Image: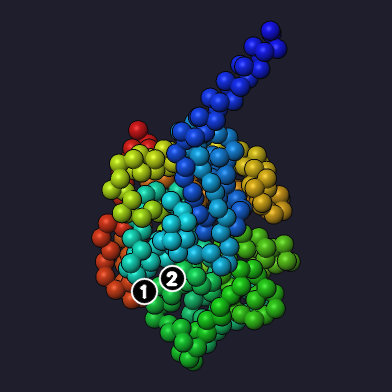
Amino acid sequence: MRKILVALMAGAMSLAAAQAAMAADKVTLQLKWVAQGQFGGYYVAKDKGFYKEEGLDVTIKPGGPDIAPEQVIAGGGADVIVDWMGGALVAREKGVPLTNIAQPYQKSGLQMICPKDGPVKTEADFKGRTLGVWFFGNEYPFFAWMNKLGLKTDGGKDGVTVLKQSFDVQPLIQKQADCISVMTYNEYWQAIDAGFKPDQLTVFNFSAMGNDLLEDGLYVMDTKLKDPKFKETMVKFVRASMKGWKYAIANPGEAAEIVMDNGGQDENHQKRMMGEVAKLVGTATGKLDTATYDRTVKALLDQKIITKKPEGAYTSEITDAALK
């Protein structure tokens, strides 16, 4: 009899667990790039059960060189995406109504590095040089910077030649470019690992120069925000995500291990990345700084990357509710 009772209890518990899982609201997050410390907060939130505590069943989809988050969400493949503001606003103007609901990254991690034994020491040395630039929506901060400097990017003698850069530091190693794009948390350290010493590099940091555009925000389709149920789900998602970021910042080693469990490469690199990313996320409130938003919009308008000032491209309602 006791075995029967135990079996019945186990069955009841399994049924309850299954019902709870079925009741959880499903959310699909599309990342901008592959699994790495850059997205550590989301992986931690899932691993530590923060999403589950909010009644969410979150699927995290890694990105890659052939994956455009704007296209994924437009096609219904995600509920929320991680994207840079430049790419999101361009997509919005083209008919994909993306709205920023939270801004985990408070600072930009974009830099351009040049060997000090090369021809570029200052911005005045750019003219006539070849600069490595990422595309697929990552190029907008660079073009806005060149526009600010008054430099053409068509390869003429009075401007710069743009090299469509691979997502590594090979163009610098192979001397295909005088300077290349790197992120503070990723490719910069690949350059160091490749043999460059910090004092051998001239670094142009977009944030330090005041040329930073917003990176790694959370975006949804504004049409879905009209649904109160979806809006409530996004409040829970943002609250759990920022809890994940706070945990990741406080525990970078453990966060790096969680990223490794989800497909990250090179644990030491992931640990170093978590430390660098923490500098960009700051206090992990997720609130959008409107001054940086306005600067991002102005830079895109000045370069004619977008043609009109966007309306409704962000909302503070989600983070305000998540922080209560």
* Colour scheme of the picture: rainbow
Residue 90: x, y in percent? 37, 68
Quick one: SS at disc 1? Answer: loop
Q: Residue at x 61, y 68 (%)?
A: 167
Give the side of residue 305 with respect to residue 34, left or right.
Answer: left
Q: Residues within 10 Å of mark 1 (few under 14, many from 20)?
A: some
Residue 52: x, y in percent? 51, 34
Q: Is residue 173 visible?
A: yes
State which quadrant residue 175 falls in. bottom right
The amino acid type of the residue labelled 2 equals Tyr
Task: Mark 1 or mark 2: name the one nearer the start of the chain.
Answer: 2
- Labelled disc at residue 54: none
State which quadrant residue 251 falls in. top right
Q: Residue at x 60, y 57 (%)?
A: 34
The answer to whether mark 1 and mark 2 are in CB contact below 8 A is yes
Q: Which residue is mark 2?
A: 140
Q: Residues within 10 Å of mark 2 (few under 14, many from 20)?
A: many
Q: Quadrant of the N terminus?
A: top right
Q: Is residue 185 above or below residue 248?
A: below
Q: Is residue 291 visible?
A: no
Q: Which residue is mark 1?
A: 305
Q: Residue at x 39, y 40 (%)?
A: 233
State which quadrant residue 70 falls in. bottom left
